[in-house]
Amino acid sequence: MNNILRTENLSLVYGENTPFEKKAVNNLNIEIKEGEFLGIIGHTGSGKSTLVQMLNGLIKPTSGKIYLYDEDINANKKKLRNVRFKVGMVFQYPEYQLFEETVYKDIAFGPTNKGISGDELDRRIRESAKFTGLKDELLFKSPFELSGGEKRRAAISGIIAMDPDVLILDEPTAGLDPQGRDKLLNQIKKYHQVRKNTIVLVSHSMEDIARFADRILVMNKGKCEMLDTTRAVFSEGKKLETMGLRVPQITKIVQKLRENGINLSNDILTIEEAYSEIISFLNKGGKLK
Amino acid sequence: MRDVAFGQFIPGKSVIHKLDPRIKLILLVLYIVLTFCTFNYAALSVPLILAVVFMLLSRISIKQYMKSMKAVLVIIIITSILNLFYGNGDVVFQFGFLKITDSAINNAIFIVVRILCLIIASATLTFTTSPTDLTDALERLMKPLKVFHVKVHSIAMMMTIALRFVPTLLEETDKIMLAQKARGADMESGGILKRAKSLIPVLIPLFLSAIQRALDLAMAMECRCYHGGEGRTRMKTLTLKSRDTLSLVFFGLVITTIILFDIFIVHTKR
Ligand SMILES: Nc1ncnc2c1ncn2[C@@H]1O[C@H](COP(=O)(O)OP(=O)(O)OP(=O)(O)O)[C@@H](O)[C@H]1O
Ligand SMILES: [Mg+2]
C-alpha cells in the first residue's frame, strides 16, 4: 500500500518563547497508508488532537513537514484549502461549529465551499445524514434545537458530505449513548469498506480501537511510542500501562484465564473473538473449572 | 489569536509579585501622574530609571516587555513624528516647508519617553498581578464610592468575570475558526464584504456559546448561593506588609526628588 500521509520530523510547540511553552508534538515520523483504518491512542494531553489538526493544515507545524500524496502541504499556502477538502476533519466537539438556519444548510456548507451544487449537493446531504443516523425530519430544523447527540451527528454529516480521501475523527463518540456510538462507528467502518478511503480515528476507548483499527499509533508526551498492527500493539499490555493506557478489557480477561492455565489464544481483541475462542475451547473438551 | 493577550499575568515570586495589589495600583496611578509632571530632563530621567528598576525587579524577561511594546509601537512612532514637526523655537533643520525646531525635538523625546514609561509600568502591573487580585484591589479601593450608591461589588465582579473569560473566548474563536476552515471556509481572501460575510460562520457559534456560558455560569453561581456583595467575606484578605509600606515611603521620596528637580533645574525649552 502507498502512503497517503507522511510526516517528517514533525514538531509543534505551543506558546514558543513564553513561560507557557509546551511541546505538544515532538519530532514525529509516521506514515499513514492509503486505505487503512488507523487508530490513535494516547493519554490526555499526549498531542493527538494537535497532530491530527496539523495533518490537514489547520495548524502550521513549528518545524518538520507533512506530505499528502508526496506533496508538502504547507509548501503552497494557496493549496491549503484543497488539502482540507482531501483531508476531512471532525473535531473533538464538532457541535460548536453549527451555524446555519437549518441542519440541511449546515451540512451543505462544506460541499458548497468545495464547489458542489444542484442535485449532487442534495444527494450528498441526504446520504451523509442517513449515514450518521440523522432522521429526515430533523434536516429542516434549526441545528440549535437538536439534542447534543443529534448535533454531533449533524456536524459529522457536514464533513462526510465533503467526501474526503482521508477522514479524521477526533473522539467522535464522546457523549453519545452506547447504541448510538456503536451504530456510528459501524457506519464509519462500512463507509470505509465501501468508499475504500483512509480513516484516522482518535479514541480513548481501547475497545472501539481494537474492534475497528487495522493499525494503531500510540502517542506519549508528543512522541510516537508505537505504530504497528492492532494485535502487535495490544500484545504489549505492560508497556501500554506505563503510558496510562491499557489493553481492551476482554483481552485482559483472556490473559487472566491463560494465567490460570486455560489454554486460549493470546491475541484476543474483541468480545466476538473471545466468544468463539471459548466455545471452540469448550468443544475440544476443555474445562473453565 | 492568542498572541493578542497584552500583558498577560505571568506567575512568579519576585518582590513586585508579592506586593499588595492595592499598593501596586496606587503606585501605578502615582507613577503615571509623575511621569507627566516632569518638565526637564533631570526630572524625566527619574521615571525612566524607575521603569528600568521595575523591569529588573519583576524578573520578567525583556522579551515579554518587548512584546507588549510592539503593540503600541506604531502609536509611539506616529506621535513622535507628528511632534517633531510641530512647535516653535530655533530652527535646527529645514526641509522645504517642513522645519524641525529644538523645542519640537525636546517635545518628541518627552512624549516617547513618557509613553514608554507608561507601558513598562502598566505592563509590570499586569504581568505581576493576577486578574482576580487586580479586581479585588479595585473593589477595595473603590469602596468609598459606596457612599454615592455605586455598586462597587457588582462592578468588580463583572470585571473579574469579563477578564476571566477573555482568554476563554479567544480560545473558542480559535477553535471555531479552525473547525470552519476544516470545512473549507475561506477567511483569508476576497474583498471586505466577502471577508465580513465569511465571519458569520464564526460569530454565530461564538455568540451562542458565550450566551450558553453566561447562563451556565449564572446557574453555577446561584447553586453556590451567590447573592451579591452583602455580607460576603473573603478567602484571601489583603493585609499590608512592611514591604508595602516601605514601597510607599520610597515612592514618596521619588516624588519629592522629581518636584525638587522640576523647581530647581532650569526648564528645558519647550
Ligand atoms: N491551543 C493551545 N495552546 C497551548 N497549549 C495547547 C493548546 N492546545 C493544546 N495544548 C497543549 O498541548 C498538549 C497536547 O494537547 P492535545 O489537545 O493535542 O492533547 P490530546 O492528546 O488531544 O488530549 P485529549 O485526549 O485530552 O484530547 C496539552 O498538554 C495541551 O495542554
Ligand atoms: Mg484531543
Image (cartoon, rainbow, N blue to C red):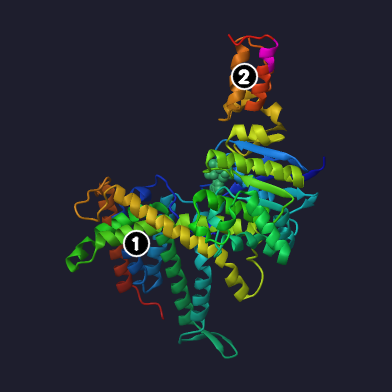
Residue in the picture at 68% in, 34% down: A216
Residue B124 falls in which quadrant of the image? bottom left
Q: Any mark on residue B28, and which?
A: 1
The kind of residue on which mark 2 rests is Val
Q: Mainly helix, strand or loop, the magenta region? A: helix
Query: Which chain's residue wears label 2?
Result: A
Magenta-highlighted residues = A280-284
Q: Is residue A117 visible?
A: no
| Place of residue A274 in the rendered image (x, y in percent of width and height, measured from the top left) | 65, 22
Q: Any mark on residue A108, and which?
A: none
Q: Any mark on residue A254, and which?
A: 2
Is residue A3 shown in magenta? no
Image position of B1 (left or right of A161): left
| Place of residue B185 in the rendered image (x, y in percent of width and height, measured from the top left) | 64, 63
Residue A232 position (above or below residue A52) = above
Image position of B180 (left or right of B107): right
Q: Is residue B21 visible?
A: yes
The kind of residue on which mark 1 rests is Leu
